[in-house]
Amino acid sequence: MSGVMKINKVCIISVFFVFCTKLHSQQMYTESNAASITNETNTTTGWYTPGSTLITSDANNPYMGTYAIKAEATSTADNDRNIRYTFNATVGDVFDISIWAKTGSQSVDPAFASWSGVSGFTNPTPISSSSTWTEYNFTVTATSSTVVIRIYTGSSSQGTSGDILYIDSVSILKKDIENPTAPTLSSDGVTANSVNLSWSGATDNIGVTGYKIYKDGILESTLNSTNSCQITGLSASTSYNFTITAIDNYGNESSLSNVLSITTSNISSNTSPWLQAESNISFVEGNVGIGTNSFDSKLTVKGKIHAEEIKVDLSVPAPDYVFKKDYKLKTLEETQKYINENGHLPNIPSAKELEENGLELGIMNMKLLEKIEELTLYIIQLEKENKKMMEFEERLKSIENKLK
């Protein structure tokens, strides 16, 4: 794609996604059962026992929703006193795990948990000695591709038939430990006392939520999700080095961007510009203002511009990177979560930011093109799924005809 973009007349492109899901983008525990915090039903799906432990859903005073999971020992044998849940992981993955538990009837010691496939967990760990719902939190690291959670109805060495333990609101969150990629920093205006900074290109496996701007290696400002800002309070005729990093919702920070070196002009902020009153055109050090004598770029116009064509040289990369194999296309669930939390599409400025900072044609049109290319990929995915569904329906019709 060419590095130059042409806009004939006015081109406005709107892309709008509408979908609904309850799935947490990082939630590993998505079983539809009584202990699920995302999709509770009257089942015990996903939980099993190596012996004859009774596993049922119970509506008697659950912690959350309508049901809890009830585990009841059928004998003193180890396999008849525990229930288990298994999930897949990648070695090195970090998980925040939460389990709510309470006792029913126990003959001796508290129930306990015994897990395998993770580090950072003490075996055995007592998890309940109270008939009141209590939350237990663990942060563990996967040491195997298979993690097994074992929850016993009694202590590790004791217990008898009839011991009961309830669990509810189980959450297994994969912790984000991946840093965002570094943004590319640029400037579109320098005065004696300020500089306009803009940036692009930062990506993250979950989503970039903010940026840190450094001036000469010292943190200058921490910003929410935006793509431009103005740094003020600079000294005239002075050189500065600016860098920026991207941060995500977990506080992971990218490496430093490119170093942007700028030198402020030698005209102080209170110097009056040359002004041609009859045409209301002002000029200072190569900067021109039309309809205003307050400007911070080569040309500032206070009013409307009528042109047959506008040609914009891009200062940001064109978004063909979306079609590369290593591009991390957000799932629809991740995009829905971002919209719910931020009120706008990822990597698109909010309405407030546009109202405060204005709209840069080159940057914004590349962002919109990025969304169009992402939407194309979603449509291709849906088309593949539709074809599979149509093939399935054809096979089903064939079977029905044969049965007739």
Image (cartoon, rainbow, N blue to C red):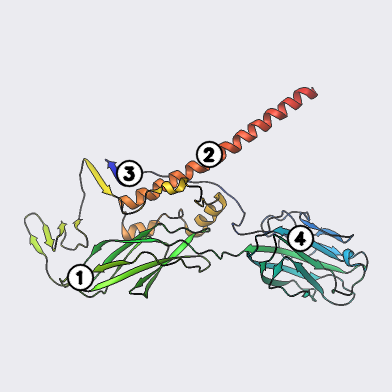
Query: Mark 3: which secondary structure?
Result: loop
Q: In this view, does 103 lie to the left or right of 319?
A: right
Which image quarter holds the C terminus? Answer: top right
Q: Residue 321 carries which label?
A: none
Residue at x 22% of width, y 63% of height: 296
User: Which residue is tagged 2?
Assistant: 380
| Label 3 sits on residue | 2
- CA separation in Å, label 1 and label 2: 51 Å
Do the numbered discs 1 and 4 sit on residues whose CB atoms are within 8 Å?
no
Front: mark 4 or 3: 3
Q: Confirm or deny contact between disc 2 and disc 4 (CB under 8 A).
A: no
Element under disc 4: strand
Q: Which of marks 3 and 1 is nearer the N terminus?
A: 3
Find disc 1 in the rendering and name its residue. Answer: 192
Could you tell me which residue is drawn at 67 percent across and 63 percent down? 172
Q: Find residue 47 and report its horizontal and vertical position in percent.
A: 78, 58
SS at mark 2 in the image: helix
Q: What element carries label 1?
A: loop
**Few, some or many residues within 10 Å of mark 4 (<14, 14–19, 20+):** some
Q: Which kind of residue does numbered mark 3 sit on? A: Ser
The N terminus, quarter of image: top left
Q: In which quarter of the image is residue 348?
A: bottom left
Q: Residue 353 occupies which quadrant of the picture?
A: bottom left
Q: Which of marks 1 and 2 is nearer the N terminus?
A: 1
Where residue 5 appears, as percent x and y from the top left, is 30, 45
Q: How far apart are marks 3 and 1 (CA)?
A: 35 Å
Identity of the residue drawn at 40% across and 46% down: 369
Give the vertical position of 225 relative to 362 (above or below). Answer: below
